[in-house]
Amino acid sequence: MREAVIVSTARTGLAKSVRGGFNMTHGAVLGGHAIANAIARARIDAGEVEDVYMGCAQPEGATGMNIARLSAVRAGCPVATGGVTINRFCSSGLQAIAMAAQQIMTQGTPVAVGGGLESISLVQMGGMNTNRITEEGLMATKPALWMSMIETAEIVADRYKVSRESQDRFALESQRRTAEAQKTGRFDDEIVPLATKMKTVDRATGAESVVDCVVSRDECNRPDTTYEGLAALKPVLMGGMKVREGKYITAGNASQFSDGASACVLMDSKTAEQKGLEPLGVFRGFAVCGCEPEEMGIGPVFAVPRLLSRHGLKADDIDLWELNEAFACQTLYCMERIGIPHAKLNVDGGAISIGHPYGMSGARMTGHILLAGRRQKMKYGVVTMCIGGGMGAAGLFEFLH
């Protein structure tokens, strides 16, 4: 069987949804920017890319269009390059990379792009999200399929006895790690600045204006975070509409709404060798597993063992882990159940401190773990996350250096 390698990665910075630099930027612009720069970093011609796989959890943001196709064209790919949009919610970006790799391995595709994007500002916060429309039959049998993510996180925290203090301390460490990574430039090899326009609102008058801006770094990190400040936050419903006494999830120990895009160029290992390219790593495998929708956050507990067993590996064999920090409570529980040392997990912080554009995160995490594994001369990395609706996904990568 052919071997699929990742030869480059590129992404935008992550901008705060609604209030950040991408609050007016179309998803195709985000996706096109990431794809174009990943192709440039791979030192190939855009016409060599046979197909583009882009994850997007809320693809209705492209007004019904195939956002992967739009992004490919926006990136400068010729019309002969295909594009397919993939939605496995928070695993969409990782799923896209897996599908690109599998097409190379089994169908002879020489070069493909896998990545993800999300504009929470324009879709979820802009009124185009249709995910809340229910169906009578499923509501009668599995109503938790429509349960909000924050509600499922509360169930996980309560059911598995994950204390509020442990969640806040984990969130604090995530903020600290990201601040240190930004300070030392460990995201610099990933991010390509994007010039765009953003809407600003004067808090005193409410007047709106449009200004030029450049998103050149992740905007969400709060390096001045303290444990005392996190502990003082009140648990709230999504959007902060109602304080909920006796609950766990706050704005400080949950992932942050953000916008952005990330892309990787993948190719057959022999093609890379012929071109004289030095891959970042090899795609080794991907697995998913479902779980009860009401505790969707524990999905990695089921997906990771399935992935590792298929490759004759144990948790101790993995050098680096990226586990999406949808909520601190589910991350802590998954760490404990899988047996992941905190020192090997999200070494530069995660979604709590970096941000979480749903369909993009898996691609961002993949690019990051590949660069980190190469720098540290490690062998194996796993990217994993929970998924809305009750699933877990996990991808295995071997680093090359």
Image (spheres, helix red, strand yellow):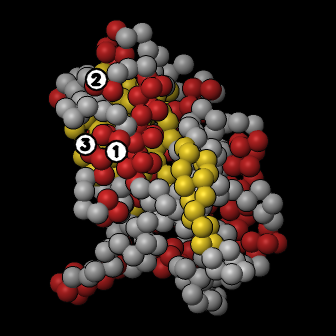
Residue 367, compared with residue 94, is above or below; it is above
Front one among 277 and 270: 277
Residue pictured at 33% horizontal, 27% vertical: 46
Residue pictured at 17% horizontal, 84% vertical: 137
CA–CA distance in space, label 3 to label 2: 14 Å
Look at label 2 and name its amino acid: Glu
- Binning the other alpha carbons within 10 Å of mark 2 as few (below 14), some (14 to 19) or many (20 upward) gives some
Number of disc labels: 3
> Which residue is denoted by mark 2 in the rendering?
48
Residue 328, compared with residue 34, is above or below; it is below
Contact, mark 3 vs mark 2 (Cβ under 8 Å)? no
Contact, mark 3 vs mark 1 (Cβ under 8 Å)? yes
Q: Position of residue 281 (x, y in %)?
A: 45, 26
> Which residue is denoted by mark 1 in the rendering?
71
> Which residue is denoted by mark 3 in the rendering?
83
N-terminal of the two: label 3 or label 1?
A: 1
